[in-house]
Image (cartoon, rainbow, N blue to C red):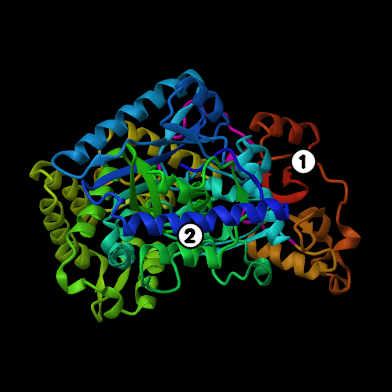
Amino acid sequence: MGYLDVSNLSKKKDRSNYIHHLLNDIRALEMMIERNLIEESPIRIGAEQEFCLVDEQYEPTSSSLDVLKDLNDPHFTTEIGNFILEVNLDPIILNDRCFSSLHKQLKSAMQKAKTVAKAHQSKIVLAGIMPSIILENISLDKMTPMKRYEVLNEAITKTRREDFNIHIKGVDELNLLHDSVMLEGCNTSFQMHLQVNPHNFVDTYNWAQAIAGPVLSACTNSPILFGKELWSETRIALFTQSIDTRTNSYVLNENQSRVSFGMDWQRGTITDIFKNNISRFRSFLTTAYIKDSVDMIHNGEIPKLKALNLHNGTIYPWNRVCYGVYNDNPHLRIENRYIPSGPTLVDEIANLAFWVGVMTGKPKKYNDIHKIWDFKDVKNNFFNAARYGMATQFYWNGKYISSHDLILDELLPMAYKGLYSVGISPEDAEFYLKVIKDRVKSHNGSEWGIRSYRNLLKTYKRYEAMQLLTYHIYQKQQKGYPVSTWEVLKPNTSKLLKSKQTVKHIMNTDIFSVDKKDSIELVLNIMKWKNIHHMPVTDNTKKLLGILSWKDVEGYLNKKEKETIYVSKLMRKHVIVTDEHCLIEDAAKVMTDNNISLLPVLRRGKLIGLITTNDL
């Protein structure tokens, strides 16, 4: 959980004071390691659960602060979007039935949140990216009104000095300019923590990097963003681009994104990892300090290293190194940030058990992995897993192997060995690792989502399919069965009974349009080829300039001058339009009252869809 009481580093005095504390924290950490003050045992695990709040239409609802207030529980905290909350689970010793215990704790916390959310006409959905999220949900007015998020957005946008240019290419392609870091609000994750012995931390961290791709491939759950089918785990691409400060990299001396898999293996000691981050990424936030961390150690106190943790909280490697203090004992841990929320609580705890098992079950042959494998192969494995999920071919031990074979033949046996070696009960190991095994043999969250969404699109327009997919994710999550048992949705899946039908549910988004400088000959041919009776006229920004109907142009079918008559001469400039939130019955009345058979749909003056009498 990050600090909430922060301010921008704008004054030279504040910056130098912060840097002093930051460097002091590094010295303090080195002293604690030298004096064996960092806890080595018992090893603990933990997790953070992010979740979305939706309304009766399964659209994001801005109720997080109201729900948080009524929860009145320090385990819960805010996220950047005002429709997202996070619950932080208590750390638990890695032994016996710890995964069942953590599962019980998570289930209890989510039940509490569910009860409070219900009082605010909200429901809880677990999804790496909720299918029904739209651009309106990530505008600046949907940012949680807290100083931390305001300062973060201000610092990053000021550094970039231009909008965020999002480009993600999967089966579909997303190109988007956005003016704030609120795109981060599309993502929710299940962040997993594993305490690590400081004396072999770097080797353990490198192993976490090596296994990240295969682990992710089994856990992908975010294939759809704004109705487009992109990566199996689209969060990886979206988060990287939504917190990117590199437009003016010559100012910050950065050559990698703050969200990153890294550029090479880690070497040296744990403090070298922090030193590398400080060298590479400049600080832009500060908070209040009470005591000097080095002085605290000399006085027999344990410092919280607030400056170092604040800096660490503004960089987002997919495996992040963390320092913390629990029950007055300082410790070091790896935070796994690449696993998405959902599809169910049992799936998430299984993901944790699988990851921890592979982490603790590493065979001796993989010691000093940085001397054996090329880091770029490992990095390539990770991004291929994000793109292709269970369809990934990994480069592992010098040869290519499918995700299925690697997980079933090597990693799951390794995970069993690892869990047993740290004292996990056979009941826990068998139950949770079987969830992973069944998922590999059936389907994971992204595969279920893609198949279901494609089927829904055979019957419904894009937005209604997005809404229906979210609805069925919610319904299946209530039953609690792992995603491997979920039946793929059929094309004729019934629509929401209480759904308020708006224009966005039925509008056509695959639009053919022409420029005002195009010839009528081109318009006639497109209309005949595509069997359409109306042609919007737009500029290169998709601003609607006018409309042409078949009646306007059919008289030129057999006339030679159609080659030299341009759209601008015949188009009707005064066009009746609507927006996507207009109720269908209201749109129908507008069309009837004005005796028109086409109604363009605009968002901020830009054409995003069309509805015709046939759609109605």
Q: Disc 2 marks which amino acid?
A: Leu
User: How many numbered marks are there?
Assistant: 2
Q: Foreground mark, 1 or 2?
A: 2
Please name the residue shown 51% across and 47% down the image.
292
Above-or-below relation of 340 to 271: above
Q: Amino acid at mark 1?
A: Ile
At horizontal 23% and vertical 59% (from top left) the residue drawn is: 359
Q: Which residues are magenta?
A: 492-513
Magenta stretch holds residue 456? no
Q: Which residue is mark 1?
A: 596
First in residue order: circle 1 vs circle 2:
2
Q: Could one spot residue 239 in this view of the protein?
A: no
Which residue is depicted at the point 8% across and 45% down? 426
Residue 409 image offset from top left, x and y in percent? 15, 65
Q: Quadrant of the C terminus?
A: top right
Was residue 497 drawn as part of the magenta stretch in this picture? yes
Q: Would residue 598 be visible to someone looking at this image?
A: yes
Q: Nearer the viewer, residue 354 or 77?
A: 77
Q: Is residue 426 left or right of residue 67?
A: left
**Could you say where residue 133 lies in the image, as x and y percent from the top left?**
54, 43
Return the x and y of residue 457 as percentages of the image width and height.
47, 49
Front-most of residues 167 and 542: 167
Q: Secondary structure at mark 1?
A: loop
Residue 541 relative to residue 425: left or right: right
Q: Is residue 18 above or below residue 467?
A: below
Q: Position of residue 59 (x, y in %)?
A: 53, 35
Instruction: Check disc 2: other Cα within 10 Å, few if <14, some if 14-19, many if 20+.
Output: many
The residue beneath circle 2 is 230
Magenta stretch mostly in which secondary structure?
Answer: loop
> Within 10 angstroms of label 1, few (less than 14), some, or many (20 or more) residues?
few
